[in-house]
Image (tube, rainbow, N blue to C red):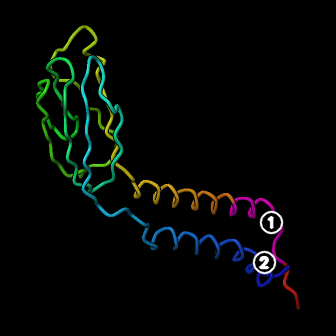
Amino acid sequence: MTVATRLPHRLIWILPLAGLLTIIVFVPLPTPTPQDRHISIDATQFQFAPGRVEINYGDHVFLTLTASDVVHGFYLDGYGLQEQITPGISQQIEFIANQTGTFRFRCSVSCGPLHPFMIGELVVGPNSPFWRSGSVLLVSLIGLLVYLWQKKGSSHAPLQEVY
């Protein structure tokens, strides 16, 4: 077998992987356009309703906070937003979701014996750079495995020249 006949066999695996890697890196991912999001959260002993809120990165968020029973507080980790909520009076917090991830919101006013467990979640996504870098890593690992597999399958005898 000559070098000329072995080289195209290796390129058969490299070219599709290189093409896939190029698509992952350079093709823009669809991202949701930022929207105005109006969300109402009601605080009661000892929970927030809803307990989980999902929004997209860049959304302009209007939180309307109400308390049904006693005075509660609202503190959003990561954003540093805090408000005291009195029963019968709604409070509004406005912010732009400029950080991705999962952030806890919790009651910041002692409201009873189960107060420490009054926690909710704000999920800001998608985190497309994470998926893009994960895809690049996956394609790179596949390429490395194919290379090692081909190297193991090739003979270690010196190449013979064909005349």
The residue at 22%/54% (across/down) is: 60
Q: Is residue 44 above or below residue 59?
A: above
In the displayed structure, does residue 41 sit left or right of residue 138? Answer: left
Q: Which residues are magenta?
A: 146-159
Q: Amino acid at mark 1?
A: Ser
* 146 vs 65, nearest the viewer: 65
Give me the disc on residue 6: 2
Q: Amino acid at mark 2?
A: Arg
How many residues crowd around disc 1 within 10 Å: few (fewer than 14), some, or many (20 or more)?
A: few
Q: Quadrant of residue 32?
A: bottom left
In the displayed structure, does residue 7 sit left or right of residue 22? Answer: right
The residue at 52%/72% (across/down) is: 23
User: Which SS class for mark 1?
Assistant: loop
Q: CA distance from mark 1 to mark 2?
A: 9 Å
* 129 vs 96, nearest the viewer: 96
Asked if the residue under mark 2 is in contact with the one under mark 1, i.e. CB atoms within 8 Å, the reply is yes
Q: Quadrant of residue 58?
A: bottom left
Residue 108 placed where, x, y %?
17, 23
* 10 vs 27, nearest the viewer: 27
* 55 vs 158, nearest the viewer: 55
Residue 5 placed where, x, y %?
80, 82
In the displayed structure, does residue 80 sit left or right of residue 7? Answer: left
Q: Is residue 133 above or below residue 118?
A: below
How many residues crowd around disc 2 within 10 Å: few (fewer than 14), some, or many (20 or more)?
A: few
Q: Which residue is identified by label 1? A: 154
Residue 86 placed where, x, y %?
11, 25
Residue pushed farthest top?
Answer: 113
Q: Quadrant of the C terminus?
A: bottom right
Give me the disc on residue 59: none
The residue at 12%/36% (across/down) is: 91
